[in-house]
């Protein structure tokens, strides 16, 4: 039993094989169930993620130490055998995969022999991970030991059947992935409305059967040209309830590059479901606090700005996150109560524009529009509305998971977003004037300035205004991110770790909510070229594919992965990474358990003192930019140990 550091609040337990992993996992699950007596250090455990021969133990570092967790695991009784139920699931496969011929050449047999051997034996579901319903299958023919792709595909189709190492598996949804593809199946692997949602469960036997491609006639509705009207009709729904039931709604006139619903995410890793949630939770929490919502209320996460929403009914809104130009547009003459540029007689109305210069609660009257421009720094903004958005939840969360497709779809033009009725509405009448009073006597900055709730004058439940953050990342400038090395830093040479910590890395345009693909001048040198058995990859994991170019996993990351994780971001740096735009530059700084930031840097510098000075040199301008973009934002939810 080996224990590896995995971020601020994680221990990766490495075991001899699958059988021992299952025994230890069963003992841990028993020791951490809610009906057990409290008082153990294992009460601090927040999540368990088993894999082929590892278990990730996530814990609250405020309640327990890493040493305490390790001691508690060592004391567990893991001698009992684990009963695994078994049923047989048949999966028909069309063997037309892009990598079938390459696999045959690699293993020295024909493609037909690959198909025959893949179908000859029943496979067994060892565990579920990577993505919702993605089952790792073991027990196939001994010939199957296949390396993952050097560079993972950005998009693997749903139903793709693949190989990686000694495992086989089926991709339940469209996602990125590095497995070698044999073919595809039409069977549904994940249905969140089913019980259980995943077709395959640990212990199931799986038999693949070869079939031929079928020609399927498309329904008439798919062949019609009414798709746009169908989309518009669907977009008229505001959420779980229709627009007629909603107290107010925002209409997405221009949804921008990517706008999604987010909250604090899910805790369903046992089903292969990632957490998702806001990429920058500090900013989403601030937006909710400004309008008086609970921190976990659904908000709109806006990537790259360029959006416009129109209010249907009065609403109190706030925008927090990346500094961006924000304008509220309405009519100076509101006799008809509708924000139209021309009356029925054709007379032009004067448009009133209110510029928002900070993060604050704002009254958006019926018919008015709010526009959010492109951020001057950072990448993502969060729009909250008082009462919260009335959006359907999946597995306890309204978050959009862009990798697996769980949760609401990204916002489209013309969609109406219903607003829940707030439990206590802030006053929107005059609150004593001052520089915040607009032309109608209503306080544009919300209702938090004096007075009391419920008396018809002013409420005090919205948050106080906050200035925009000053030091968010910018394209072309250096941002420092703090990391804890591990769990697989020992797979890299001293030169590889030195390059990781001392080189400058650039965020590429192939980045999204799943992760940031980085590009550097050199590839990270590995000590161990072996294939890694899939294991947990929490948010903030920095995975290094065979190409040697790192990938920082963000909130829609796969639950498990098969490339070594060289380091894990601290919680605060993970939030900062959610604001990194394409073109931004990164330098990693290593933290020791005591919080010191240069421990490994000094050790590696002494080990590599004879390396060329040019490898670690940077201009005075880069140093100044690096200091300027160090982590300066404080977040009570994201303290570093």
Image (cartoon, rainbow, N blue to C red):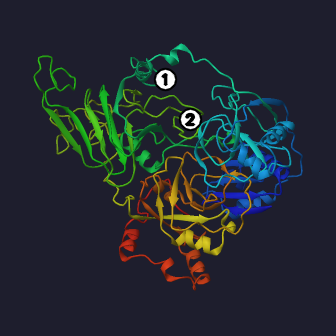
Q: Residue at x 68, y 28 (%)?
A: 186
Total of numbered circles in the picture? Answer: 2
Q: Which mark is residue 405?
A: 2
Residue 569 in percent (x, y) is at 55, 60
- Tell me which corner region of the image, top left, top right, bottom left or bottom right, holds residue 299: top left
The one nearer the camera, 63 or 313, is 313
1 and 2 marks in contact (CB < 8 Å): no
Q: Is residue 542 visible?
A: yes
Crowding near pointer 2: few (<14 within 10 Å), some, many (20+)?
some
Residue placed farthest to the bottom in the image?
Answer: 610
What is the quadrant of the N terminus in the image?
bottom right
Q: Residue at x 82, y 55 (%)?
A: 76
What is the quadrant of the C terminus in the image?
bottom right
| Residue annotated with mark 1 | 240
Q: Secondary structure at mark 1?
A: loop
The one nearer the camera, 358 or 607, is 607
Residue 169 in percent (x, y) is at 73, 41
Q: Secondary structure at mark 2?
A: loop
């Amino acid at each position: 039993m080996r224990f590896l550091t995995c971020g601020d609040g994680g221990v990766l337990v490495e075991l001899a094989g699958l059988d021992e992993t299952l025994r230890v996992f069963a003992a841990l699950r028993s020791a951490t169930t809610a009906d057990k007596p409290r008082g153990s250090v294992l009460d601090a455990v927040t999540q368990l993620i088993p894999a082929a021969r590892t278990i990730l133990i996530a814990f609250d570092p405020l309640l327990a130490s890493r040493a305490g967790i390790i001691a508690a695991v060592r004391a567990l009784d893991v001698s009992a055998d684990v009963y695994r139920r078994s049923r047989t699931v048949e999966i028909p496969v069309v063997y037309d995969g892009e990598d079938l011929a390459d696999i045959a050449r690699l293993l020295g047999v024909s493609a037909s022999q690959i198909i025959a051997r893949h179908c000859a034996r029943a496979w067994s579901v060892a565990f579920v991970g990577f993505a919702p319903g993605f089952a790792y299958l073991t027990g196939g023919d001994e010939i199957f030991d296949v390396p993952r792709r050097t560079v993972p595909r950005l998009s693997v189709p749903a139903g793709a059947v693949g190989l990686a190492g000694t495992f086989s598996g089926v991709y339940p949804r469209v996602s990125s992935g590095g497995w070698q593809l044999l073919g595809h199946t039409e069977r549904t692997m994940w249905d969140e409305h089913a019980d259980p949602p995943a077709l395959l469960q640990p212990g199931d036997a799986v038999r693949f059967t070869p079939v031929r491609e079928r020609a399927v006639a498309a329904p008439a509705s798919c062949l019609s040209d009414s798709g746009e009207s169908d989309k518009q009709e669907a977009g008229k729904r505001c959420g779980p309830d229709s627009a007629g039931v909603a107290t107010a709604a925002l209409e997405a006139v221009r949804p921008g590059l990517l706008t999604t619903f987010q909250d604090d995410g899910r805790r369903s890793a046992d089903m292969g479901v990632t957490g998702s949630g806001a990429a920058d939770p500090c900013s989403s929490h601030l937006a909710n606090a400004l309008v008086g919502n609970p921190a976990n209320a659904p908000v709109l996460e806006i990537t790259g700005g360029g959006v416009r929403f129109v209010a249907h009914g009065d609403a109190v809104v706030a925008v927090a996150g990346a500094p961006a130009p924000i304008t509220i547009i309405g009519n100076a003459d509101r006799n008809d109560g509708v924000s139209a540029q021309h009356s029925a007689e054709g007379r032009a109305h004067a448009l009133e524009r209110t510029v928002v210069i900070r993060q604050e609660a704002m009254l958006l009257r019926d018919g008015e529009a709010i526009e959010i421009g492109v951020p001057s720094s950072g990448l993502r903004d969060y729009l909250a509305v008082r009462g919260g958005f009335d959006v359907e939840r999946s597995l306890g969360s309204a978050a959009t998971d862009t990798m697996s497709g769980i949760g609401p779809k990204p916002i489209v033009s013309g969609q109406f977003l219903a607003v829940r009725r707030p439990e206590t509405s802030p006053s929107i009448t005059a609150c004593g004037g001052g520089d915040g009073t607009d032309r109608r006597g209503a306080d544009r900055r919300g209702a938090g300035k004096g007075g009391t709730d419920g008396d018809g004058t002013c409420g005090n439940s919205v948050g106080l205004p906050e200035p925009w953050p000053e030091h968010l990342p910018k394209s072309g400038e250096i941002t420092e991110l703090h990391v804890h090395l591990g769990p697989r830093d020992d797979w890299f040479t001293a030169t590889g770790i030195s390059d990781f910590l001392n080189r400058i890395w650039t965020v590429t345009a192939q980045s999204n909510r799943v992760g940031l693909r980085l590009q550097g001048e050199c590839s990270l040198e590995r000590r161990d070229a072996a294939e890694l058995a899939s294991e947990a990859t929490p948010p903030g994991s920095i995975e290094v594919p065979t190409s040697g170019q790192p990938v920082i996993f963000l909130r829609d990351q796969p639950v498990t992965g098969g490339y070594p994780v060289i380091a894990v971001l601290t919680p605060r740096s993970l939030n900062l990474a959610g604001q990194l735009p394409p073109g931004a530059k990164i330098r990693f700084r290593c933290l020791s358990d005591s919080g010191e930031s240069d421990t490994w840097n000094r050790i590696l510098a002494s080990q590599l003192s004879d390396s060329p000075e040019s490898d670690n040199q940077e201009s005075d301008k880069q140093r100044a930019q690096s200091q300027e973009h160090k982590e300066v934002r404080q977040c009570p939810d994201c303290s570093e140990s």
